Amino acid sequence: MFSGWADDNFWVWFAGFFDGEGCIYLPKRGIAVSVSNIEKDLILAIQAKIGIGTVTEVTFNKERWRTKYTWAIRNLPEAGVILRRMLPFLTIKAEKARLGLERVDAWESHRSLLRERNAEIVRLALSGVQYKVIAEQF
């Protein structure tokens, strides 16, 4: 469906579509970025073009309600990639995307600090410092 589209053209279109049909959910921890529609082929084409995320099908008990399809990402780094690509083109959901990116950036900063701490622990252990001393330090 999107073959032949320039990357920027897709992201401009997707941001507009997302402004109308998408959701950025910010629970206490984590993030969820999703978009739903009744057109299965459209949602599958979005997933294929972006290359990440999952598609789920939701059916309803109401006779006249149509099945909907949702593409979603709940992984912080992946959500950050998507939000960064859309943000320049978002209008309605731009502020929520900024809040989501703040959460992603805070998480990435925390992960970086943990990696640095762990590298220091390994360095000390390999240099012969006793584990008890290392444990007291950290």
Image (cartoon, rainbow, N blue to C red):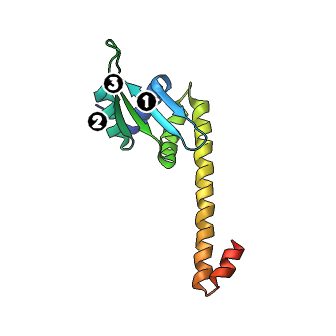
Mark 3 to mark 1 CA distance (whole Å): 16 Å
Label ID, residue 3: 2
Q: Amino acid at mark 1?
A: Val
Whichever of callouts 3 and 1 sits on the residue coming sooner in the sequence is 1
Mark 1–mark 2 contact, CB under 8 Å?
no
Q: Is residue 5 visible?
A: no
Question: Which residue is depicted at the point 56% across and 24% down?
Answer: 92
Mark 1 to mark 2 CA distance (whole Å): 20 Å
Q: Amino acid at mark 2?
A: Ser
Q: Residues within 10 Å of mark 3 (few under 14, many from 20)?
A: few
Q: Quadrant of the C terminus?
A: bottom right
Q: Quadrant of the N terminus?
A: top left
Instruction: Tell me residue 98's x, y (percent).
Output: 61, 37
Q: How many marks?
A: 3
In the picture of the structure, the residue carrying the numbered disc 3 is 59
Q: Is residue 113 visible?
A: yes
Q: Residues within 10 Å of mark 2 (few under 14, many from 20)?
A: few
Horizontal side of 90 relative to 2 (left or right) equals right
Residue lying furthest front = 61
Instruction: Tell me residue 81's x, y (percent).
Output: 49, 45
Question: Which residue is depicted at the point 63% across and 62% down?
Answer: 113
Displayed quadrant of residue 115: bottom right
Question: Which residue is depicted at the point 60% across and 48% down?
Answer: 105
**Front label number (2 vs 3):** 3
